[in-house]
Every structure is written in structure tokens, then in C-alpha cells.
Amino acid sequence: MQVKLVLAIVLCGPFIHASGQSVKPLNIGDTLTNTEFTYYINDQKHTGSLPDKNGKLTILDFWATWCTSCIKALPKVEALQHEMGEKVQFILVNAKRTKDDSLKTRNFFVKWKERYGTTLNLPSIEQDTLFGSLFPHHVVPHYVWIDGNGKVVATTSAEQLTAANINSVLEKEQTEITMKKDQDRSRPLFTNNDLPRSRLLSYRLFLKGGFDGLPSGNRLHQAGDTLYGRGITNMPLKDMYLTILREIYPHFKENRIVLEVKDPSKWKEPAAEHERDIWYKENMYSLELILPVQQAPLLYDEMLQELNRSSGFIGNIECRNIPCFVLTRTGKSNQLKSRGGETKIRLFYVDHAYLENAPLQYLIGRLNNCPAIAIPVVDETGIDFPVDMDFPEGFSDREKIARQLRQYRLALEKTERELEVFVIKGQE
């Protein structure tokens, strides 16, 4: 990580628990007093308490059914539980504020068994309000490590869940576990309460390397309906360029990005899963820009300039003669013209994609978001009337797409055209 920041996070409280009792948030080094809770394993209800009566290390795994990173880490958690046996106990904690109810979490476990053929045999706390108040956090997954005496020894991301780290905690050895420090989404990145926000005129930060306390997503700063600041966090550089380009050029597609860089591996995540954690750590970026409200219309142009100025790469729109597919008419088709009615655009449906009484441009947009085609698609049909089209075989295979287009007397022809593309070049 090229930018090194030392942060102190102070958790102020207390919180009021649903029971009406005051709950003081705990920091690393604090001790959890005897706390009882209810959990489920395979729909069977049990009661437990922390600290663990047998002196186990307990790791609370805060997760949500909509969190892909949480779900991705569950096989690792399950494998560690099996490997470490009685030394450690993982407990899944699904907080009420995630908007998951008991039905959602239990359906998740049913689908897990259907997918993997085995039950996820980990204790699961549903609709939690207590542990979320004791251990406040903004980003899931979030792991809280509590030793057998109730001492909070770590708060981490999934990357720190290793047998070596668990053993070092159990043996009370010096450990190099990296702590997860969540960032308040409402504040400018890496700032604290000392910042006089009412006097902040502008702010910008560009960080290379993944950061555990941030989600992969967006942070917005608004005054009413006016967006004057945005943060894009933990995102590969290509995706960051694309996010900004789509704001400046609303119909811009990823297949119009041309990379002219020495090491393309930095721009595409590896196929092997075991290599991805390292890749993400080295090739994620976070960018935040806040402008004076009166300069809000310049926000995305300024963000693009910041990438070009600081990333080590330069990206610009150019006209290039490049390979593409041209959608053309091969004859007249009475099936194509819409019969009228409500406009329905369902081209991303998996089971049965279709268009009803809609402009053909939506089909062009779908074809330009289709991995099976990959290169740009240009409309040269001349069709300017609403259409009805069915695609029961979907868009996963180019031959199937071509077959479905033929029934409407349409064809994709591979050729070259001079098109606007966004070219990214290395500065070196």
C-alpha cells in the first residue's frame, strides 16, 4: 500500500440495547463480562454464554445474506472450525440492522445444503442487537476475537482468519494480525471528529491497495439533491475508470476500453481463487473527491483528472478503427414490430429474456453487456419503431444469440468501424 496512515478510532457510547439496558461498546483489550445469547444449529434452538465456559477462543463472524464477501469466506470459516476443533468456536452473527429476517437466514442455510450437499454446522445468531452494539462496525464481514477470559484480542477481516494466527492467539505469542478499522461512511475518508466539516471547502484522497475497513462500493456527499462529493472505495482501477466514465458518458460500455499497458495482469483479477486475496490487496484503489457545492457539475471530470494525474496511467477518449459487430437487417419481419401495450424491458432475465413495445436501443445495450460477444456492437438496422422480441435461450452463447436474431431477420456481422473508445496508457 503506497499510502500509510495511522488511525485512532474512538467508539463513543453507550448504546441502548433493545432490552432498555445501556450497552457500552468494547474496544480491543476490553473484557466482555458474562453475556448470554440464543443461537441455532440446524433449526434447533440453544443457549450459550460468553466468555466460553471451557476457555475456548471465540470468533464472532458478523455477516449478511446479501454480502458476497461474507458468503465467500464461509467455507474458509467452516474449514478452520474443523481443523482447530475444540480450540476455537466460530459463531455466525446476523444483525437485525442488516435487514435480514429469520426466514432469509434460514432459507440461506437451506440453499447452502442444496448447493454443497452438506449442512453448514456453525452456531448462528439471528436478529442480533446485542453483539452489534457491543462491537459496532460499518462493514461486513467483520470478525471479533474473544479469548477464554473474555478479553477482546482482535477485530479483523477474513484475510486474517488463518490457523497460524489462531494458534498465536491461543499460545499468547506476539502476533502480527492486522486489525480491521472501519471507516464512518458519513465522513470524508480517514478523517475524525477533529475535522471542522462545516469549514471544509474541498477534499481529495487517492489510495492504492485494499483497505479492510472499507466496502467495495460508493460513498456519496449531497446537499439536498446536489451531489458534490463521491468516494469510490476498494475497487480495481479499470472498474473505477468505468464507473466515472459512465457518469460522464451515460451509454459508455466496458467493451470500449482499450488497454495499452505493459502489465495487463494488474487490470484483471486472476482466475485462481487462492491468488485473488493477494491481487485485491495490491490492485484495489480508493478515491474520494469533495468539491464546493457550487462546483458540483465538475465532480466527475475532476475525478477523472485525479486518476490520470495520480494513478500512473492516462486515459482519454479517442476515435479508433476497431473490430466490432454490426447489427443489420437481412429482410423484412412482421414479427419485429411491436403490437403495442406496456413497455417491458426484461433482457437481463435468466429464464426468459424479452422486450415488449420498446426501442431497439435496449437490445443494443444488452448485446454490449454480453461476455459472449465481448467486442462493441453497433446498430445499423435503421429501425426507429418500438419492437417486441423474445430471447428464450438468453445471451450466454453467441451461436444461440445469432439463432434467435435470425427469426427477426437480423444478423451480427463482424467487421471494423471507427468508434469512440477510451484508451488507457501507462505513463512509463
Image (cartoon, rainbow, N blue to C red):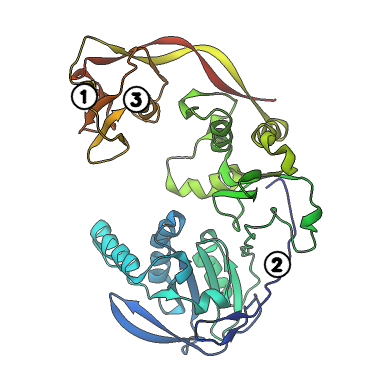
Q: Which amino acid does label 3 sit on?
A: Pro
Q: Residue 9 carries which label?
A: 2
Q: Which mark is residue 359?
A: 3
Residue 407 at what x, y percent from top left? 18, 20
For residue 428, above or below residue 332 = below
Q: Is residue 346 visible?
A: no
Q: Do the CB atoms of the residues marked 1 and 2 lie less than 8 Å apart?
A: no
Q: Which residue shows up at 38% across the image and 87% down it? A: 47
Q: Which residue shows up at 41% across the image and 57% down it? A: 66
Q: Residue 404 carries which label?
A: 1
Q: Distance between the residues labelled 3 and 1?
A: 18 Å
Classify residue 179 as left or right of residue 370. Answer: right
- Front disc: 3 or 2: 3
> Which quarter of the image is occupied by the C terminus?
top right
Residue 156 at what x, y percent from top left? 57, 65
Q: Which residue shows up at 58% across the image and 38% down it? A: 240
- Front disc: 1 or 2: 1
Residue 293 at what x, y percent from top left? 72, 43
For residue 186, above or below residue 82 = above
Element carrying mark 3: loop
Q: Distance between the residues labelled 3 and 2?
A: 52 Å
Element carrying mark 2: loop
How many C-alpha atoms fall within 10 Å of the one at disc 3: few (<14), some, or many (≥20)? Answer: some
Q: Which amino acid does label 2 sit on?
A: Ile
Residue 28 at what x, y percent from top left? 65, 75
Classify residue 413 as left or right of residue 272. Answer: left
How many C-alpha atoms fall within 10 Å of the one at disc 2: few (<14), some, or many (≥20)? Answer: few
Mark closest to the chain's N terminus, 3 or 2: 2
Closer-to-camera residue (410/132): 410
Mark closest to the chain's N terminus, 3 or 1: 3
